[in-house]
Amino acid sequence: MEWEKAEKTEQKQEKKELYPQPAPTSYKGKKNPEQLLWVQILLCAAMAAFLLFSKSTSAPYWPDLQGEYQSVLENGISFSSDTTFSHFADQTIAKLRRKAQEILNQLDGDMLTGRGGIWKVSAAKKTPPAGASLESYTVQFPFQMPVEGRLTSEYGFRDNPVNGKEDFHAGLDIAAEEGTAVLCVSDGQVMRTGYNAERGNYVIVRHAEGVQTLYQHMSCVFVRGGETVSISQRLGTVGSTGYSTGPHLHFELIVNGIRMDPSTNFPELFA
């Protein structure tokens, strides 16, 4: 009998060595990592759904969302557990991030519509394009000239100096020597900086009362997204990057998502 018990004990020991059982994981006082992954997926899905909903309703707070959400996309989400579920979750998050990035790119296109702030117009219906108004807007807080220079193109309908065709110009063109300082017109926060083939190097600043300002064609940019800026602070220098025929600053005034004529704020340009 004793030898039978010893044999059974030995067989059990061999089985344990051949098929070791994982040590039980205790989540007492801790959150299950898989639960955390599901939470991350749901949060990202909720953010993507919110972007889609806001896009479909033409919400006026798009510009405010872009800077904050962009940082989430750039930082991404990392997973520490090496499991099949974590790989699945990682792929799911990546797809959601790509979809959200596509939406943001479209939003950026909506906000930066037109070639260098220029819209084509229909000869049959001479009305401002969606997202722009012919009305002027006078800012009710300290506001100054963005650059010292000469006005070369006003806001509104005009004959394009490059091709001679009529278009809608969404800002003011102020010619100045390359390297001239581009100044922030008022206190605010940099929403984003970037570059594209039409606008060249550009900066978007958010101010009080739903006001935003856009500066483009710069040769150099001295600020970055999220940075707090003050009136008269140098944002960069005049250049001719993007769709441009010479050194100048294209300046736009955007109020609650609508481009407005900024002329009344700069009477010295029209003296």
Image (tube, rainbow, N blue to C red):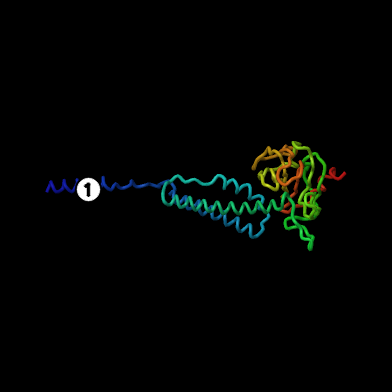
Which residue extends farthest left? 1
Q: Amino acid at mark 1?
A: Lys
Image location of residue 116, percent across then percent down = 72, 49
- Number of numbered markers: 1
Image location of residue 55, percent across then percent down = 63, 57
Asked whether, in this view, residue 85 is left or right of residue 207, the answer is left
Image location of residue 172, percent across then percent down = 78, 47
Is residue 143 placed above or below 160 in the rendered structure? above
Asked whether, in this view, residue 252 is left or right of residue 13, the answer is right
Q: Is residue 137 visible?
A: no
Which residue extends farthest bottom? 124
Which residue extends farthest right? 271
Image location of residue 197, percent across then percent down = 68, 47
Asked whether, in this view, residue 249 is left or right of residue 56, the answer is right
| Quadrant in which residue 217 is drawn | top right
Q: Is residue 224 visible?
A: yes
Q: In the structure shown, which secondary structural element does the residue marked by tag 1 occupy?
A: helix
Name the residue located 20 percent from the left edge and 48 percent from the top edge: 11
Is residue 244 placed above or below 54 in the rendered structure? above
Q: Nearer the viewer, residue 217 or 106?
A: 217
Where's the C terminus, which quadrant? top right
The residue that mark 1 highlights is 12
Callout 1: few (<14), some (14-19), or many (20+) C-alpha neighbours within 10 Å? Answer: few
Is residue 222 placed above or below 251 in the rendered structure? above
